[in-house]
Amino acid sequence: MTLIQRAVPFPHWEFTAPGGDQLRVVPERGGLLTGWRCGGVERLYFDAERFADPAKSVRGGIPVLFPVCGNLPDGQLHLPQGDFAMVQHGFARDLPWSLEPLEDGCGIRLQLQDSDATRAMYPFAFRLSLEYRLEPEALAIRAVIGHEPVRHDPVRREPVAQEPGREATPMPFAFGLHPYFGVDDLAAASLEGLPASCFDHLGGGDGPTATQLQRLPQGVDLRVEIAAGRASAPCLTGASQGGAVALQADAPFDHVVVWTDPPRPMVCLEPWTARRGVLGLELAPGERRELRCRYVVVAT
C-alpha cells in the first residue's frame, strides 16, 4: 500500500491498495474523501472547480455530518448547558482532521477531536475516528464516536481541567455520510430496494417513494426509514460506466437520504442515524459508539 501527498489537480493525499483501488482525501477540508477508484472506475462525483473556492460549499466526495444531520428547526442546539448555534450538517465537514494509514495497510483513518472552536458550538469533549477500508469491490466505513471524560493537552499529553458541569450530562449527537455517486445520465439512473413510502424534505410530507424517484432528473430530497430486518439494500443503478452501487448499513444507520442536484450527474445515497432536526443518540462520559456501513459495487 502507499499513501502519497499529491499537488494536482488539487492538494490531496492518495492511498493505493495492493490491488490498485484508490482513495483520495483532503484531511484539512473536513476530512473529505474526494475520490474512490474501484475496479478501475472512479465511483464518486466531485466538483473540483467549486472545491477550489473555499467560500463555496463542497459538491462531491463524501462529506461527514456531525453532530447533526440536516438542520435544526431554529438553527439552535438546545441543551441543559444553554442554547448553541449549529450550522446545517454540523461542523465536522468544515474542520481539519488528522490522517494516518490503517495498521493492516488496507485503508486510512481520519480523526477529529474537540477544540476551543467546537466547544463554543457544542460543549462536549469528543473524539471521532473514521476509517475507510478498501475491500474487493467495496468500501467499508467504520466510525467510532467517543464522549471523552477528560481532554488531554495535545503537546504535553496531560489532563486539562474541564469547566464545572461541562461533562455532567450525556453527549447527544447524530452522524451521517453524504456521498455523491457519479452517474452517466441522471435521467437513466434508478434506485431499488427502498421502502414504499418516504418523507419529502422539499414538499414537507410523506408520500410514495416511487413517485419521488421518477423525479431524480428534476431534483429530489427524500428520506426513508430502513426496516430493522434490512432484507434489502438500497442500490443505485446507472452509476459511472454503467455500474451499480449498493449501500449496506447496520443500525443505528436507520435512515437513508436520497438527493439530486440537477444538472449535476450524481446521486447522493446517504446513511443517517436520525431524521433531520433530531440528534437521537447519546453517550455518557467515557462511552463510545461504533457505526458501520459498506458501499458495494454490484455487477450489472
Image (cartoon, rainbow, N blue to C red):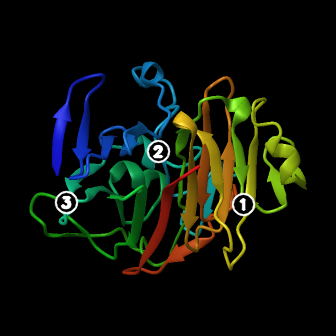
Image location of residue 186, percent across then percent down: 68, 31
Measured in 3D between alpha carbons, the distance from the residue under mark 3 to the one under mark 2, in whole angstroms, is 21 Å
Q: Is residue 135 left or right of residue 265?
A: left
Q: Secondary structure at mark 2?
A: loop
Q: Secondary structure at mark 3?
A: loop
Question: Which is nearer the eye, 259 or 19?
Answer: 19
Q: Residue at x 52, y 34 (%)?
A: 241
User: Residue 172 lies in what quarter of the image?
Assistant: bottom right
Residue under numbered circle 1: 193
Residue under numbered circle 2: 62
Question: Which residue lies most toward the front here?
Answer: 300
Residue 126 image label: none
Residue under numbered circle 3: 105
Q: Earlier in the sequence, mark 1 or mark 2?
A: 2
Q: Is residue 262 above or below residue 73?
A: above
Image location of residue 190, percent across then percent down: 72, 43
Image location of residue 124, percent across then percent down: 42, 65
| Residue type marked 1 | Gly
Measured in 3D between alpha carbons, the distance from the residue under mark 1 to the one under mark 2, in whole angstroms, is 22 Å
Question: Which is nearer the eye, 210 or 69?
Answer: 210
